[in-house]
Amino acid sequence: MVIDFSFLKDEMMRHIDAPCDHGLIATIADDELLRMFCPESETFDDWFARIRDAVQTQGYCETTDTRLSGKLYVIKHQPTAECLAAHWFQRLVKPLAERSDGVAVLSKIRVWETPNCYSDYINPDLA
């Protein structure tokens, strides 16, 4: 069987690159950092509540509704390579299976911190 894996790039661009590239990834627990991103036209409590609600319901919040209109991506955990690998695995596993009609199975995500340091998240169903 031959599969065109261009859908993999499409999904990675949609779920990782578009919301995160040239933006800031932060944890919801760092409210003091997030306070700096609150638009001047809003109260921090209202703005933060919307961010927190999105993180609680979907595991992340991607927004440009920030003080300087920059990209902000907020997750439940610290944005370490280990946590990002697991997070992005969860974001990609279902769309990749759906786009391949169940033929392609995401086996691993690797996130590089530096040229010499990375973290892998391996699909627990394949371990």
Image (cartoon, rainbow, N blue to C red):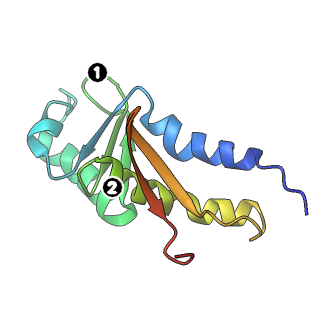
Q: Quadrant of the N terminus?
A: bottom right
**Quick check: 80 above or below 113?**
below
Residue 35 on image: x %, y %: 13, 36
Distance (Cα) linking label 2 and label 1: 27 Å
> Would you call the spot at circle 2 few (<14 residues within 10 Å), some (14-19), or many (20 or more)?
some
Residue name at image x 27 percent, y 50 percent: 51
Amino acid type at image mark 1: Leu
**Quick check: 84 above or below 41?**
below
Q: Is mark 2 on a helix, strand or loop?
A: helix
- In the image, taking residue 102 as reference, residue 56 lies left or right, namely left
Give the numbered dot on residue 83.
2
Residue that label 1 marks = 68
**Quick check: 7 above or below 127?**
above
Residue name at image x 14 percent, y 46 percent: 30
- In the image, taking residue 92 as reference, residue 85 lies left or right, namely left
Residue name at image x 74 percent, y 71 percent: 102
Residue 21: quarter of image = top left
In front: 41, or 24? 24
Give the numbered dot on residue 127.
none
